[in-house]
Image (cartoon, rainbow, N blue to C red):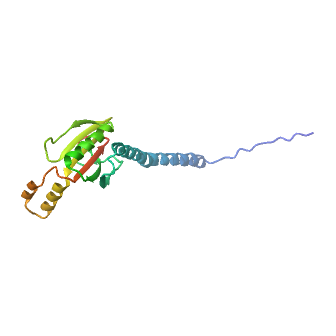
Amino acid sequence: MTKTKKTTKKVHVPLHRRIILPISLLFIVLLVAVLLVTSIIPTMTNRARYNKIVAVYNSIDVGSEYLLQRDEVFGDKRVYEYDAGRTTSSARYYTRGANVDVTARELDEKIKAAGFEFFDEPYAGSLQKQYHYKKDGVYVRLSVDSKLRSDAFFNTFWMKGNMDALNTIDPNAGPSDVIIKVNLDDNNE
């Protein structure tokens, strides 16, 4: 029995071919990482912020007697151009067929029942009610105003009429315009 000697011949791969595959793989990994950091992660963060803001509104549960007029809820952090320390709040605008005092009192109770703590009334005694609340770094701002008075003001203003007529409208008269703002970052609006 004769043994045949097997020889393995080394194939010489040029240097440039040995480098192309690892560099191509590195490029693909870096590209995926850049896409992840610039697109996917911010989208996930914004979606999480949006869900948290919607959860705040759901916890307040204004009820069916509040007619939603405008919904400006968003998840991205919108920093003011002129002040990097302030961000824009998400907002929901409602109308309710009740007087201002009744509406403000009812919403104050609902916001507190959702676990928010009242901490400020910036314009105490003004015609428009405004209350600020906070819970775990989340801020809620409630504004309630007479829709009749507000409409008369803006209609008179745009029509360049006599603003003295506003004094004849009871600032407590319903229906009420309501704005509920939610901000996850600050109360500097």
Q: Which of 58 and 46 is in front in this view?
A: 58
Q: Which of 70 and 75 is in front in this view?
A: 70
Quadrant for residue 118, please give it.
Answer: top left
Q: Is residue 145 among what the camera can see? A: yes
Assign the N terminus to one quadrant of the image: top right
Assign the C terminus to one quadrant of the image: top left
Q: Position of residue 115 (x, y in %)?
A: 32, 36
Q: Does residue 26 appear left or right of residue 164 in this picture?
A: right
Residue under the point 9% across and 63% down:
161
Residue under the point 20% across and 53% down:
174
Q: Where is residue 26 in the image (x, y as percent from the top left)?
A: 52, 45
Position of 171 relative to 184 (above/below): below
Position of 98 relative to 136 (above/below): below
Q: Position of residue 28 (x, y in %)?
A: 52, 48
Residue under the point 36% across and 45% down:
58
Q: Is residue 80 among what the camera can see? A: no
Number of marks in picture: 0
Position of 109 relative to 153 (above/below): above
Q: Which of 106 and 135 is in front in this view?
A: 106
Q: Position of residue 60 (x, y in %)?
A: 33, 43
Q: Does residue 29 appear left or right of residue 124 in this picture?
A: right
